[in-house]
Image (spheres, grey):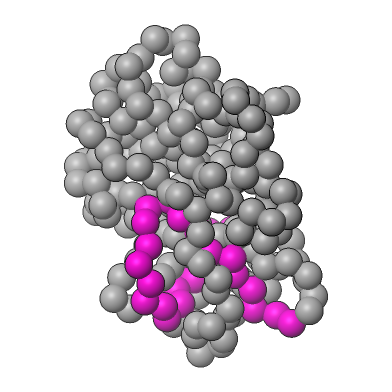
Amino acid sequence: MGKVISNERVSEQVYLLKVERNDECRMGQFYMLRAWGNYPLLSRPISIFNKSDEGIEFLIQVVGEGTELLAALRPGDPVTLEGPFGNGFPETQGRVALIGGGIGIAPLYYCAQQIPNADIYLGFSKEPYLLDRFSSVAGNLYTNVGGYIVDDVDFHQYDTILTCGPHGMMRAVQTKQQTTGCLSRVYVSLENRMACGIGACLVCSVSCVDRRKKACTDGPVFAAEEVLFHD
């Protein structure tokens, strides 16, 4: 259980929630959050946006009943957090690019805190948000509104590329890695639906080249070449 410190609206249907919590976390991990009783039935998986001595921040996009309730939280309200879960992003080497699309930008801010001078590429369909926060931790910050942020990245310039975004963007990252013949280590963080967060329910199953894996326990981060993206 945690207590809400703040809950700020940063864009249309997007909120930055800060909760009192002092856990050891790794970049790319997530929590299961809930702020209600028996309904909705399931907690919501939310990646770590940032961790400080004060608490943990989560970037929340309102897409249904659960996230609507999280967005309505006020300072002092209780919220249940289970986690942190997942393997998260690996240690990086050399020049690093962070690529995020939409609400998939969420885990990249904490990554940038851990990786000095990483270049950050953020794609938005509409109004961009939190650019001042990202600019403060980026080597260089590039944004694209209404287009395809993956097109703006020269994969050959980087040794490691960490990405998170919608299914189509992750597939585009994988395709660009394959077609350009770059030697970068490329990792994708998948935004699969989850029910339990601990690998028991199989809701977050991921098709991989060797077998089916679980986004919650095997991931949510995978090497880009490992995943089989289906239409």
Q: Which residues are magenta?
A: 10-37
Give the percent coordinates (x, y) of residue 91.
Answer: 29, 42
Answer above or below: position of 146 versus 87: above
Of residues 181 and 225, which is closer to you in this image? 225
Tell me where residue 96 sits by quadrant.
Answer: top left
**Residue placed most toward the observer, 189 or 99:** 189
Residue at image point 50% right, 75% down: 7
Q: Residue 118: give x, y in percent of width and height.
A: 25, 40
Horizontal side of residue 71 vs 224, given as left or right:
right
Residue 146 in the figure: left or right of residue 65: left
Is residue 4 positioned above or below 207 on the image?
below
Q: Position of residue 142 (x, y in %)?
A: 34, 36
Q: Is residue 163 visible?
A: yes
Magenta span contains residue 15 = yes
| Residue plotted at (66% across, 34% down) | 212
Tell me where residue 13 sits by quadrant: bottom right
Q: Is residue 129 visible?
A: no
- What count of labels does the image hold? 0
Residue visible at 38% across and 72% down in the picture? 23
Q: Judge by depth and name the residue closer to the eye, 108 or 230.
A: 230
Vertical relation: 220 (above or below) 40: above
Nearer to us in this view, 138 or 230: 230
Q: Position of residue 222 (x, y in %)?
A: 49, 36
State which quarter of the image contains the C terminus: top right
- The residue lying at 70 percent from left, 25 percent from top is 230
**Among all residues in the image, which is located at the extreme bottom?**
76
Whether residue 14 appears in magenta in the rendering, the answer is yes
